[in-house]
């Protein structure tokens, strides 16, 4: 078990639920650190390399695995995603609040290493909202991949209900942001 000064927060939720929107606001308001994941998937038109993801080749990814650089990694719909542990460890040692935007499987893997992590799952008010939000977002994904994401969302949500510390409904954005901030600041109990 790791014992650090900073707080580690995992934000998960189905694709299109508003994770990035919420995380970037929380990062701004709390001056927190959003850890960039690496991925081998294609960069979307509106995405900036290094901002949310660092886009790397499969060779680089495999090298990262061999060199034990990832706190957790997974293959999702044929693409590889990984969370490098060194930047997290450094930020926590500096006493920073560190946000990770990863899937439920990743969140549970992180909890095995960092027992004090707060696992937050964002849910949409209605499933149909997810489809609308995914359609309105262009991230180098085709229709098939979007369909698969919607199907996977149910399974992830069920797992999160079982194992996550907090479920936050993203209906009104401002309310959801404030709920996440209260959780981070420790003003909210477990399983809210
Ligand atoms: P994720 O990171 O979970 O995939 P995004 O943050 O990219 O999701 O949000 C997907 C889309 O939904 C974006 O266009 C965003 O502006 C919109 N969105 C996020 N939260 C809300 C909300 N509470 N109400 C309406 N639209 C929202």
Image: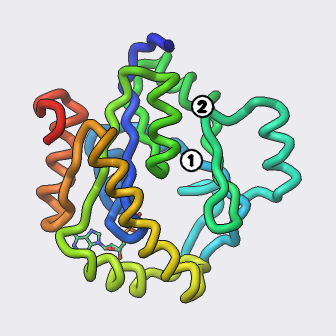
Dot 2: within a 10 Å radius of its alpha carbon, few (fewer than 14), some, or many (20 or more) residues?
some
Crowdedness near tag 1: few (<14), some (14–19) or many (≥20) residues, C-alpha within 10 Å: many
Q: Nearer the viewer, residue 153 or 3?
A: 153
x, y percent for residue 62: 83, 46
Residue ID at (15%, 48%): 178
Tags 1 and 2 touching, CB below 8 Å: yes
Query: Residue at the spot x=33%, y=67% of the render?
Result: 17
Q: Quadrant of residue 151?
A: bottom left
Residue drawn 60% across and 31% down?
Answer: 87
> Vertically, is 2 above or below 167?
above
**Residue 28 appears in view:** no
| The one of 36 and 165 positioned closer to us in this rendering | 165
Above or below residue 38? Residue 164 is above
* 131 vs 62: above or below: below
The circle drawn on residue 146 is none
Residue that badge 2 annotates: 87
Say whether residue 123 is left or right of residue 137: left
* Residue 129 seen anywhere in this rendered image of the structure: yes
Q: Which residue does the image show at 62% across and 31% down from the upper left?
A: 85
Q: Position of residue 120 (x, y in %)?
A: 30, 44
User: Residue 36 — which label?
Assistant: 1
User: Which tag, 1 or 2, sits closer to the chain's start?
Assistant: 1
């Amino acid at each position: 078990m790791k014992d650090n000064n900073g707080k580690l927060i995992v934000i998960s939720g189905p694709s299109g639920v508003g994770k990035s929107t919420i995380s970037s606001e929380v990062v701004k308001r709390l001056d927190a650190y959003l850890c960039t994941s690496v991925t081998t998937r294609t960069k979307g038109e509106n995405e900036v390399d290094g901002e949310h993801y660092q886009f790397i080749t499969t060779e680089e990814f495999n090298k990262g695995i061999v060199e034990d650089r990832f706190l957790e990694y997974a293959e999702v719909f044929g693409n590889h995603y990984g969370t490098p542990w060194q930047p997290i460890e450094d930020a926590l040692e500096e006493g920073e609040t560190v946000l990770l935007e990863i899937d439920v499987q990743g969140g549970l893997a992180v909890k095995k290493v960092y027992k004090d992590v707060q696992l937050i799952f964002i849910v949409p008010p209605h499933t149909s909202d997810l489809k609308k939000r995914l359609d309105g977002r262009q991230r180098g994904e085709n229709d098939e991949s979007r369909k698969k994401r919607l199907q996977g969302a149910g399974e992830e949500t069920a797992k999160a209900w079982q194992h996550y510390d907090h479920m936050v409904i993203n209906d009104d954005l401002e309310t959801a942001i404030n709920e996440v901030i209260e959780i981070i600041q420790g003003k909210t109990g477990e399983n809210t």
